Structure formats: structure tokens, C-alpha cells
Image: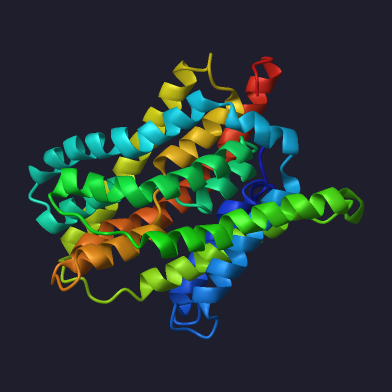
């Protein structure tokens, strides 16, 4: 007989999802607090505070031998980057053609194609992979590499898919990625060599997840303060529904395909694949859209799918963490490589 799970046990097991929903609720109550124009100064506290802290902790946690081992996993990296930059745009083209038959706003459809061309984020995919006990090192490597590749590939992909392109600010993007990601990782690894972190019993994972929750909270604050898009309520509902369906399909495909190729990938690798290959960057995406469609009256419409995609991937990720963790443990019991 199956034992009933009490509400307390459920919240304890799915605390990250519960905390994400709480962040959304608090952001909806008073979005100005955590917005870019708000008193929390999120342009600094998020980018150079929370995100840098997450990667500093990752630098503490990562084993040096796992870093070198990750460099050799070229099949894993190739799979993630090809899925991100080749498969997702092609599949979205087909998906958009099907949606166009339902009379959805053409600028919303263009926005979906724009989302498909975006690189992976450098925060949510990594932290969710870590929370699900996946291959965190591979997630970091592919998120960083994907962001650098996106500087070159995303404009070309936009040119191919939309007939429009833009020049991504290469130097400033490289500087930001170096300061917020690479430098904290290096510092974390250096401190690990000189400090006995285990002796201090610092709850690294909890601190990292709290930093992620701060990022999520501020993201939703900005989302709730988005000005009027000029779309009808039906267009907005269609956008949310389309983004949700697209993400679920991509998650299923990435999981099934990588699981089919489990000869090459461990269970922990598959978790990293699921998050890294389907997540899209809002941080790099919004500047690209602002440059590409500067002066367009339809900028708000074309931005909406990306604004919806980012929080949706976090919510779906929160829902998946406990399930993927359970799946990972079941694979270990079957003595599969992890």
C-alpha cells in the first residue's frame, strides 16, 4: 500500500518549486521593488552579485579532475550545441508554420523564431542541473561555450530564419561573461586549493539555489512591469500556450534522443543535456532584440515570446528537478554509468 505524502513532506521534497512559486507571487505583489529601476539595483546585484556568487560556489564545488574529464566529452558538447543552434531553430520553423494556420499574430510567430535562435543561459540551466544532481561541470562548460558561440551564430541564425540580422556587441559581451562567469569559477577553484571548505560545512547548494531564487524574483518583477504590448488578450494566451507546448516538446525530444544514445551519455549527462539544450538566454536575448528591432513599433510583440519563455523554463525546470533526481537514482540502482 502506497504511503500518503503529507503537505510538509511534499514541500520539503519540492522546496525549490515552492520557492519559485513564492517568488512569482511576491514579484506580482510589488514588481517595482525587484525591477531594473527599483531600489535593489538589480543591474548590479543580479549580474555581478547573484550570478557571480552561483559560479563562485560552482568553482568551490567542482572537482578539478571532473573539469579535465569534461573537456574530453566532445560528443556530449557537440550534441548540446547542435541541438541548441541547429535543431531548435529548424523544429521551431515547422512549429511556427503549423501555428500560422490558427491565425496567430505574425509578430508573435517572429518572436518564437527569434527565441529559437538564442544561445543558452549561463545561470538557470546550470543551477537546475546541479539541483537535479546532473553533470554540473558539463552544464557550465556548454552554457559558457554556447553563450560565446551565440555572439556569432545567433545573428547568422536570425539572418537565415528572419531575413534580418544585427551586430552583437562582441567586446562588452565577452567582458561580461568573463567577469560574471569565468572569473568567479577561477576564484572558486583557487580558494578551494587553499581552504578546507568541507571543514566549515557551508551549505553551498542552498546558498546557490537562494541566489537563483533572487534571479528568478527579479526576472518576474521585470516581466510584470512590461509595458502594454499592443496584443489582444487572445494573442497573449496563444503566446503563453505556444511557448509552453514548444518547451515541453523540446524537453521530451532532448530527453528521449539522449536516452536513446545512452551508450555515449551517462544519466547525469542526460540531465545536463535536457536543461542546456532547451533553455534560452534572456540576458543576451533582450539586448539583441533591442538592437535588431530598434525603432520598430512591434518590438514589444516580438519580445513577448522570449519574456514568456524565460520564466516558463524556470517553472518547468523546478517541476522536473525532483523527477529527474528520482530517475537518476533509479538508473544508479540499475548500475548504469552516472
- Compared across the picture, whether 213 is left or right of 104 comes to right
The x, y position of residue 249, in whole percent, is 33, 35
Question: Relative to 7, does residue 275 appear above or below in the rendering?
Answer: above
Can residue 198 be seen at all in this image of the molecule?
yes
The quarter of the image holding the N terminus is top right
The quarter of the image holding the C terminus is top right
Q: Nearer the viewer, residue 31 or 300?
A: 300
The x, y position of residue 8, in whole percent, is 69, 52
Q: Nearer the viewer, residue 57 or 32?
A: 57
- Compared across the picture, whether 250 is left or right of 262 comes to left
Q: Image point 60% across, 65% down: which residue? A: 50
Q: Image point 23% across, 39% down: which residue? A: 92
The x, y position of residue 5, in whole percent, is 66, 42
- Compared across the picture, whether 315 is left or right of 248 comes to right
Q: Image point 44% across, 44% down: which residue? A: 146
Question: Relative to 111, does residue 226 appear above or below in the rendering?
Answer: below
Q: Nearer the viewer, residue 136 or 2?
A: 136
- Count of picture labels: 0
Amino acid at each position: 500500500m502506497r504511503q500518503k505524502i503529507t503537505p510538509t513532506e511534499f514541500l520539503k521534497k519540492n522546496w525549490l518549486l515552492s520557492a519559485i512559486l513564492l517568488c512569482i507571487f511576491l514579484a506580482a505583489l510589488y514588481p517595482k521593488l525587484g525591477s531594473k529601476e527599483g531600489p535593489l539595483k538589480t543591474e548590479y546585484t543580479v549580474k555581478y552579485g547573484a550570478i557571480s556568487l552561483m559560479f563562485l560556489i560552482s568553482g568551490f564545488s567542482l572537482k578539478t579532475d571532473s573539469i579535465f574529464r569534461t573537456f574530453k566529452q566532445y560528443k556530449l558538447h557537440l550534441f548540446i550545441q547542435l541541438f541548441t543552434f541547429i535543431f531548435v531553430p529548424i523544429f521551431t520553423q515547422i512549429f511556427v508554420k503549423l501555428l500560422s494556420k490558427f491565425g496567430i499574430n505574425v509578430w508573435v510567430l517572429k518572436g518564437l523564431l527569434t527565441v529559437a535562435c538564442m544561445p543558452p543561459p549561463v545561470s538557470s540551466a546550470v543551477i537546475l542541473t546541479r539541483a537535479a544532481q546532473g553533470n554540473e561541470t558539463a552544464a557550465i562548460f556548454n552554457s559558457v561555450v554556447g553563450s560565446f558561440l551565440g555572439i556569432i551564430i545567433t545573428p547568422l541564425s536570425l539572418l537565415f530564419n528572419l531575413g534580418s540580422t544585427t551586430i552583437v556587441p562582441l567586446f562588452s559581451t565577452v567582458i561580461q561573461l568573463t567577469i560574471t562567469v569565468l572569473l568567479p569559477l577561477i576564484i572558486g577553484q583557487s580558494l578551494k586549493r587553499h581552504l578546507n571548505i568541507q571543514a566549515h560545512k557551508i551549505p553551498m547548494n542552498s546558498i546557490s539555489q537562494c541566489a537563483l531564487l533572487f534571479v528568478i524574483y527579479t526576472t518576474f518583477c521585470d516581466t510584470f512591469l512590461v509595458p502594454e504590448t499592443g496584443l489582444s488578450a487572445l494573442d497573449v494566451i496563444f503566446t503563453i500556450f505556444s511557448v509552453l507546448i514548444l518547451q515541453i516538446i523540446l524537453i521530451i525530444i532532448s530527453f528521449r534522443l539522449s536516452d536513446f544514445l545512452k551508450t555515449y551519455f551517462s544519466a547525469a549527462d542526460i540531465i545536463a543535456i535536457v536543461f542546456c539544450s532547451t533553455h534560452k538566454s534572456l540576458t543576451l536575448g533582450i539586448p539583441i532584440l533591442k538592437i535588431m528591432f530598434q525603432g520598430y513599433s512591434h518590438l514589444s510583440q516580438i519580445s513577448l515570446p522570449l519574456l514568456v519563455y524565460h520564466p516558463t523554463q524556470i517553472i518547468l525546470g523546478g517541476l522536473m528537478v525532483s523527477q529527474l533526481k528520482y530517475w537518476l537514482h533509479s538508473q544508479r540502482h540499475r548500475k548504469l554509468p552516472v
